[in-house]
Image: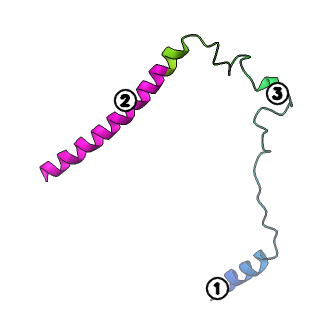
Amino acid sequence: MVFTQTLRSAFRSGSRVSRGFQTSARAQGGGHSTGSYEDYIHAPNMYNLEKMKNRKLFFGTAISGLVLGGCGIGWFAISFQQAKTRSA
């Protein structure tokens, strides 16, 4: 009986209390609070792909790796499913 009365009084008083979101620390600005755009760009020629050295080799290797990885995952999934079916 005492427990239910305590709960009722807690719920009644809780509705009057302001329930806002509180954090323990101030939100940080991600390191870009100075307003300087040059601080964000780390290299002056970061997006200059035309002047990139060994561009064809780099992108050819990357695309080949992605294609082979995608085919390898598919091959592994099919062989794994077939092995499970054979053993059952």
Q: Residues within 10 Å of mark 3 (few under 14, many from 20)?
A: few
For residue 4, the mark is: 1
Indicate the secondary structure of the residue bearing disc 1: helix
Q: Is residue 88 above or below residue 26?
A: below
The crowd level at tag 2 (other Cα within 10 Å; few <14, some 14-19, many 20+) is few
Q: Which residue is mark 3?
A: 37
Secondary structure beneath disc 3?
Answer: helix
Give me the residue at 78% from left, 40% from top: 28
Residue 77 at x, y percent in the picture? 29, 43
* Residue 18 locus on image (x, y percent): 82, 68
By secondary structure, the bulk of the magenta-drawn segment is best described as helix
According to the image, label 2 marks what residue? 68
Q: Is residue 14 magenta?
A: no
| Tag 2 near tag 1, CB within 8 Å | no
Q: Given this view, does label 2 or label 1 mark the residue nearer the observer?
A: 2
Residue at 76% over, 75% down: 14
Residue 10 or residue 83, whichever sits in front: 83
Element at badge 2? helix
Could you tell me how far apart the alpha carbons at marks 3 and 2 are, in whole angstroms? 39 Å
Give the numbered dot on residue 18: none
Residue 11 in the image, given as x and y percentages of width and height: 72, 79
**Image point (38%, 35%), residue name:** 70
Q: Are marks 1 and 3 in contact (CB under 8 Å)?
A: no
As displayed, is residue 57 above or below residue 24? above
Image quarter in which the N terminus is found = bottom right
